[in-house]
Protein backbone atom coordinates (compact mmCIF):
# COMPACT_ATOMS: atom_id res chain seq x y z
CA UNK A 1 0.00 0.00 0.00
CA UNK A 2 1.34 3.41 -1.01
CA UNK A 3 -0.14 6.67 0.21
CA UNK A 4 1.16 9.99 -1.05
CA UNK A 5 0.65 13.51 0.29
CA UNK A 6 -0.19 15.47 -2.84
CA UNK A 7 -0.30 18.72 -0.85
CA UNK A 8 3.47 18.77 -0.45
CA UNK A 9 5.71 20.29 -3.14
CA UNK A 10 8.98 18.39 -2.72
CA UNK A 11 8.51 15.53 -5.19
CA UNK A 12 5.83 13.90 -7.33
CA UNK A 13 4.20 10.55 -6.57
CA UNK A 14 5.99 8.41 -9.15
CA UNK A 15 9.43 9.78 -8.26
CA UNK A 16 8.81 9.26 -4.54
CA UNK A 17 7.72 5.66 -5.08
CA UNK A 18 10.84 5.04 -7.17
CA UNK A 19 13.10 6.21 -4.33
CA UNK A 20 11.38 3.84 -1.90
CA UNK A 21 11.72 0.93 -4.34
CA UNK A 22 15.46 1.68 -4.64
CA UNK A 23 16.02 2.36 -0.94
CA UNK A 24 18.67 -0.35 -0.57
CA UNK A 25 20.90 0.98 -3.35
CA UNK A 26 20.33 4.75 -3.32
CA UNK A 27 20.63 7.50 -0.71
CA UNK A 28 23.11 7.96 2.10
CA UNK A 29 22.86 6.57 5.60
CA UNK A 30 21.75 9.00 8.27
CA UNK A 31 20.88 6.64 11.10
CA UNK A 32 21.49 2.90 10.75
CA UNK A 33 20.25 1.06 13.83
CA UNK A 34 19.54 -2.60 14.46
CA UNK A 35 15.78 -2.08 14.30
CA UNK A 36 15.30 0.63 11.67
CA UNK A 37 17.32 2.47 9.06
CA UNK A 38 17.14 6.09 7.89
CA UNK A 39 18.55 7.34 4.61
CA UNK A 40 18.71 10.83 3.08
CA UNK A 41 17.98 11.52 -0.57
CA UNK A 42 18.94 14.79 -2.27
CA UNK A 43 16.10 15.93 -4.50
CA UNK A 44 16.37 19.20 -6.40
CA UNK A 45 16.50 21.91 -3.71
CA UNK A 46 15.30 19.60 -0.92
CA UNK A 47 16.46 16.61 1.07
CA UNK A 48 14.09 13.72 1.71
CA UNK A 49 14.26 11.53 4.79
CA UNK A 50 13.15 7.92 4.30
CA UNK A 51 12.82 5.66 7.33
CA UNK A 52 12.73 1.92 6.74
CA UNK A 53 11.06 0.02 9.58
CA UNK A 54 12.32 -3.46 10.30
CA UNK A 55 10.06 -6.35 9.31
CA UNK A 56 8.14 -7.47 12.45
CA UNK A 57 8.36 -11.00 13.85
CA UNK A 58 5.88 -13.53 12.46
CA UNK A 59 2.98 -12.98 14.87
CA UNK A 60 3.09 -9.20 14.47
CA UNK A 61 3.31 -9.58 10.70
CA UNK A 62 -0.18 -11.05 10.87
CA UNK A 63 -1.41 -8.44 13.37
CA UNK A 64 -0.11 -5.52 11.31
CA UNK A 65 -1.60 -7.03 8.15
CA UNK A 66 -5.17 -7.06 9.43
CA UNK A 67 -5.61 -5.40 12.83
CA UNK A 68 -3.08 -2.67 13.51
CA UNK A 69 -1.74 0.32 11.61
CA UNK A 70 1.93 0.10 10.67
CA UNK A 71 4.54 2.37 12.24
CA UNK A 72 5.03 4.06 8.88
CA UNK A 73 1.31 4.74 8.47
CA UNK A 74 1.01 6.06 12.03
CA UNK A 75 4.04 8.30 11.52
CA UNK A 76 2.46 9.76 8.38
CA UNK A 77 -1.03 10.22 9.83
CA UNK A 78 0.23 11.65 13.13
CA UNK A 79 2.44 14.13 11.27
CA UNK A 80 -0.58 15.35 9.31
CA UNK A 81 -2.57 15.59 12.56
CA UNK A 82 0.17 17.62 14.28
CA UNK A 83 0.58 20.07 11.41
CA UNK A 84 -3.17 20.64 11.24
CA UNK A 85 -2.94 21.80 14.86
CA UNK A 86 0.06 24.03 14.31
CA UNK A 87 2.53 21.70 16.03
CA UNK A 88 5.94 21.39 14.40
CA UNK A 89 7.07 18.22 12.69
CA UNK A 90 8.86 17.62 9.37
CA UNK A 91 6.48 17.70 6.40
CA UNK A 92 5.03 14.21 5.73
CA UNK A 93 5.36 13.08 2.11
CA UNK A 94 4.36 9.41 1.85
CA UNK A 95 4.34 5.97 3.38
CA UNK A 96 4.58 2.54 1.82
CA UNK A 97 3.74 -0.92 3.18
CA UNK A 98 4.82 -4.26 1.75
CA UNK A 99 1.78 -6.55 1.94
CA UNK A 100 1.10 -10.15 0.97
CA UNK A 101 -2.21 -11.99 1.19
CA UNK A 102 -1.82 -12.81 4.88
CA UNK A 103 1.34 -11.11 6.16
CA UNK A 104 2.84 -7.64 6.57
CA UNK A 105 6.43 -6.99 5.46
CA UNK A 106 8.56 -3.86 5.79
CA UNK A 107 7.25 -0.31 5.76
CA UNK A 108 8.71 3.07 4.84
CA UNK A 109 7.95 6.63 5.91
CA UNK A 110 9.03 9.57 3.74
CA UNK A 111 9.29 13.11 5.10
CA UNK A 112 11.12 16.36 4.62
CA UNK A 113 14.58 16.33 6.18
CA UNK A 114 15.04 19.36 8.41
CA UNK A 115 18.40 21.01 8.87
CA UNK A 116 18.34 21.63 12.59
CA UNK A 117 20.80 23.39 14.87
CA UNK A 118 20.12 21.43 18.06
CA UNK A 119 18.36 18.48 19.59
CA UNK A 120 16.77 18.75 23.01
CA UNK A 121 19.53 16.37 24.15
CA UNK A 122 22.07 19.16 23.49
CA UNK A 123 20.45 21.16 26.31
CA UNK A 124 21.01 18.20 28.64
CA UNK A 125 24.57 17.49 27.59
CA UNK A 126 25.95 21.01 27.16
CA UNK A 127 25.47 23.37 30.10
CA UNK A 128 27.34 26.10 28.18
CA UNK A 129 25.03 26.05 25.18
CA UNK A 130 24.22 29.66 24.17
CA UNK A 131 20.77 30.76 25.39
CA UNK A 132 20.27 27.36 27.01
CA UNK A 133 17.68 28.49 29.56
CA UNK A 134 15.81 30.59 27.00
CA UNK A 135 15.57 27.61 24.64
CA UNK A 136 14.44 25.38 27.50
CA UNK A 137 11.68 27.77 28.54
CA UNK A 138 10.46 28.16 24.95
CA UNK A 139 10.49 24.38 24.62
CA UNK A 140 8.13 24.20 27.60
CA UNK A 141 5.69 26.46 25.73
CA UNK A 142 5.90 24.02 22.82
CA UNK A 143 5.10 21.11 25.16
CA UNK A 144 2.21 23.03 26.71
CA UNK A 145 0.71 23.57 23.25
CA UNK A 146 0.95 19.82 22.57
CA UNK A 147 -0.73 18.99 25.88
CA UNK A 148 -3.47 21.57 25.37
CA UNK A 149 -4.27 19.81 22.08
CA UNK A 150 -4.77 16.59 24.08
CA UNK A 151 -1.74 14.90 22.50
CA UNK A 152 0.42 12.52 24.51
CA UNK A 153 3.71 12.00 22.67
CA UNK A 154 4.83 8.69 24.15
CA UNK A 155 8.38 8.88 22.81
CA UNK A 156 9.03 12.28 24.40
CA UNK A 157 12.76 11.63 24.85
CA UNK A 158 15.82 13.91 24.45
CA UNK A 159 16.56 12.89 20.86
CA UNK A 160 13.07 13.32 19.47
CA UNK A 161 12.76 17.11 19.38
CA UNK A 162 14.62 19.05 16.69
CA UNK A 163 15.37 22.72 17.30
CA UNK A 164 15.97 25.27 14.55
CA UNK A 165 16.93 28.94 14.76
CA UNK A 166 15.63 31.37 12.15
CA UNK A 167 17.35 34.52 10.85
CA UNK A 168 15.66 36.61 13.55
CA UNK A 169 17.00 34.38 16.33
CA UNK A 170 13.66 32.71 17.04
CA UNK A 171 13.59 29.06 18.08
CA UNK A 172 11.28 26.50 16.50
CA UNK A 173 10.62 22.94 17.69
CA UNK A 174 9.73 19.82 15.71
CA UNK A 175 8.75 16.36 16.92
CA UNK A 176 10.16 13.28 15.18
CA UNK A 177 9.77 9.52 15.65
CA UNK A 178 6.02 9.91 15.79
CA UNK A 179 4.56 6.40 15.67
CA UNK A 180 3.64 6.25 19.39
CA UNK A 181 0.99 8.80 20.36
CA UNK A 182 -2.38 8.87 22.07
CA UNK A 183 -5.10 11.49 21.83
CA UNK A 184 -7.64 12.61 24.39
CA UNK A 185 -9.98 15.53 25.03
CA UNK A 186 -7.81 16.82 27.83
CA UNK A 187 -4.77 15.81 29.88
CA UNK A 188 -4.55 16.00 33.66
CA UNK A 189 -1.64 17.90 35.17
CA UNK A 190 -0.15 14.61 36.40
CA UNK A 191 -0.36 13.13 32.92
CA UNK A 192 1.33 16.24 31.54
CA UNK A 193 4.18 16.10 34.04
CA UNK A 194 4.66 12.37 33.53
CA UNK A 195 4.90 13.01 29.80
CA UNK A 196 7.89 15.31 30.45
CA UNK A 197 9.64 12.97 32.90
CA UNK A 198 11.92 11.22 30.37
CA UNK A 199 13.56 14.38 29.03
CA UNK A 200 16.32 15.05 31.55
CA UNK A 201 17.69 13.66 34.84
CA UNK A 202 19.05 17.09 35.81
CA UNK A 203 17.24 18.59 38.78
CA UNK A 204 17.91 22.21 37.78
CA UNK A 205 16.45 21.64 34.30
CA UNK A 206 13.39 19.96 35.80
CA UNK A 207 12.89 22.95 38.08
CA UNK A 208 13.08 25.44 35.19
CA UNK A 209 10.60 23.36 33.19
CA UNK A 210 8.19 23.14 36.14
CA UNK A 211 8.46 26.89 36.80
CA UNK A 212 7.76 27.81 33.18
CA UNK A 213 4.90 25.32 32.87
CA UNK A 214 3.39 26.71 36.09
CA UNK A 215 3.67 30.25 34.73
CA UNK A 216 1.86 29.32 31.52
CA UNK A 217 -0.85 27.26 33.23
CA UNK A 218 -1.33 29.51 36.27
CA UNK A 219 -0.34 26.81 38.76
CA UNK A 220 1.90 26.54 41.80
CA UNK A 221 5.51 26.05 40.58
CA UNK A 222 6.52 24.09 43.70
CA UNK A 223 3.61 21.69 43.23
CA UNK A 224 4.52 21.07 39.60
CA UNK A 225 8.18 20.64 40.48
CA UNK A 226 7.33 18.01 43.12
CA UNK A 227 5.15 16.10 40.66
CA UNK A 228 7.60 16.31 37.76
CA UNK A 229 10.64 15.48 39.88
CA UNK A 230 8.89 12.42 41.37
CA UNK A 231 8.05 11.09 37.90
CA UNK A 232 11.59 11.88 36.72
CA UNK A 233 13.11 9.93 39.63
CA UNK A 234 10.71 7.03 39.03
CA UNK A 235 11.71 6.88 35.38
CA UNK A 236 15.43 7.09 36.13
CA UNK A 237 15.18 4.26 38.71
CA UNK A 238 13.36 2.08 36.21
CA UNK A 239 15.89 2.92 33.52
CA UNK A 240 18.81 1.97 35.77
CA UNK A 241 17.12 -1.31 36.80
CA UNK A 242 16.50 -2.20 33.16
CA UNK A 243 20.10 -1.40 32.19
CA UNK A 244 21.45 -3.41 35.13
CA UNK A 245 19.26 -6.38 34.18
CA UNK A 246 20.49 -6.29 30.57
CA UNK A 247 24.12 -6.07 31.72
CA UNK A 248 23.65 -9.02 34.08
CA UNK A 249 21.90 -11.05 31.41
CA UNK A 250 24.67 -10.42 28.88
CA UNK A 251 27.24 -11.45 31.49
CA UNK A 252 25.40 -14.70 32.23
CA UNK A 253 24.99 -15.50 28.54
CA UNK A 254 28.70 -14.84 27.99
CA UNK A 255 29.70 -17.18 30.82
CA UNK A 256 27.48 -19.95 29.47
CA UNK A 257 29.24 -20.03 26.09
Image (cartoon, grey):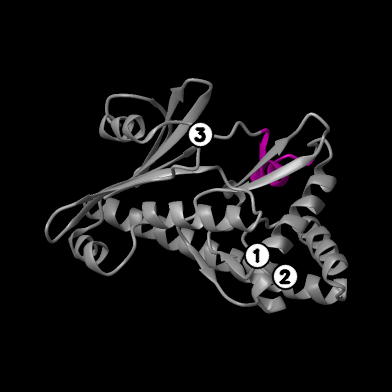
Answer with mark 2 or mark 3, whichever residue precedes in sequence.
Answer: 3
As drawn, the label of residue 228 is: 2
- In the structure shown, which secondary structural element does the residue marked by tag 1 occupy? loop
Q: Can residue 81 be seen in this view?
A: yes
151 over 14 or under it: above or below: below
- Chain part drawn in magenta: 117-127
- In the structure shown, which secondary structural element does the residue marked by tag 3 occupy? loop
- Indicate the position of residue 46 as horizontal and vertical percent values: 52, 26
Answer with mark 1 or mark 2, whichever residue precedes in sequence.
Answer: 1
- Indicate the position of residue 227 as horizontal and vertical percent values: 74, 75
- In the structure shown, which secondary structural element does the residue marked by tag 2 occupy? helix
Q: Which residue is drawn at 84% across and 69% down?
A: 214
- Indicate the position of residue 81 as horizontal and vertical percent values: 54, 58
Q: Report which residue position mark 3 lands on.
A: 9
Residue contact between numbered discs 1 and 3, judged by CB atoms under 8 Å? no
Q: Residue at x 86, y 73 (%)?
A: 222
Q: Does the magenta stretch include residue 118?
A: yes
As drawn, the label of residue 197 is: 1
Residue contact between numbered discs 1 and 2, judged by CB atoms under 8 Å? yes
Amino acid sequence: MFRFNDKQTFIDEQQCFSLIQNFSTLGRNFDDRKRNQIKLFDWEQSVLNIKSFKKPHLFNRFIYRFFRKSKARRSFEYAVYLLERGIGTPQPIAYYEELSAFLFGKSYYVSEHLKYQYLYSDLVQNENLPNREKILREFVHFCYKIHEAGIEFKDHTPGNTLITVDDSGNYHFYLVDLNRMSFRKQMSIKARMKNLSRLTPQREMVRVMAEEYALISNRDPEELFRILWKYTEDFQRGFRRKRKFKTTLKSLVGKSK
